[in-house]
Amino acid sequence: MRENLSVTKRKNHNPVVRFVSAALLVIAALSFAYFALLCIGLNTVSAFNLFWVGLGCGCLVVYALLRLLGRRGRKAQRRFAKGLLVLACVALAFVLFVEVQIVGASFAVPKPGADYLLVLGARVKDTGPSVLLQFRIDKAEQYMNENQQTLAILCGGQGADEPMSEAQAMYDALVDRGISAERLIMEDQSESTAENIRNAMAIMENPDASVVITTTGYHVYRALYEARHEGLKDVSGNPARCAWFTPLNYYMREFFAVVRDWIIMR
């Protein structure tokens, strides 16, 4: 009798079911913890930050469904667990395929002596440029100092929650750092990457000019992709860094943005 119970117990603890169950709980816990870290570190809750809450809740719902199926029939539970595992592997493979290209672009080396440096904007707080924008300003300053003939087009309008346009914030910071105002051109009407590039192209006297785009590393691939789609041919990236705890969030957000652009711009 005990032997039969032992066999039944082993059958009811299928390794695939155990693995999937544990993975769902671990992913849920890590997602909630990462959301908390983002909220504390950034001192704000952006729309995409909530993705991690959704991911954690989704994992818990699937875990509960897996447990419910186990009460109704171990065979159905095992099939469901195997299906989830296959689906997760396919999804992970696709995510990695896209992320390899995004991460690869984050190591881009800018072309020296470019005619124009496009600096893409980021949020401006009441206290000044956000950390993300500050890092972009740092990279722009470095390139401008190393390439004295390059003109910079500072891109970014003013959001409803911003005290000034992103272009103005970058202009003020670069002038304070000693960059000549004559080398800085403000484009303060754009609200998206595509608008940044289109409006900057309208400012350029030569559509075939060499262009370097300064933006955060995770954003370089999409910025270059959209720039080439808009008609820029001689374009390279100048990646800036971001806070140590944010890459996972930003690279995941960029995954969805890149897939969207592939669909729209194909």
Image (cartoon, helix red, strand yellow):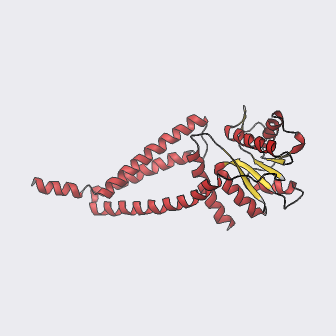
Relative image position of residue 193 (x, y in whole percent): 73, 53
Out of 130 and 59, give the one closest to the viewer. 130
Residue 203, compared with residue 231, is above or below; it is above
The quadrant of the rendering that contains the N terminus is bottom left
The percent coordinates of residue 87 (x first, y second) are 44, 62
Q: Residue furthest left?
A: 1
Q: Is residue 160 visible?
A: no
- Which quadrant: the C terminus? bottom right
Q: Residue at x 65, y 49 (%)?
A: 217
Residue at the image point whose x is 62% and y is 53% from the top: 254
Q: Quadrant of the rendered structure where residue 8 is? A: bottom left
* Residue 149 appears left or right of 81: right
Residue found 58% across the figure and 43% down from its top: 246
Is residue 35 or residue 240 the one in the foreground?
A: 240
Residue 55 visible somewhere in the drawing:
yes
Q: Nearer the viewer, residue 188 or 71?
A: 188
Residue in view at x 61 percent, y 37 percent: 44
Instruction: Give the x, y percent position of residue 261.
Output: 66, 61
Please identify the quarter of the rendering in which residue 14 is found.
Answer: bottom left
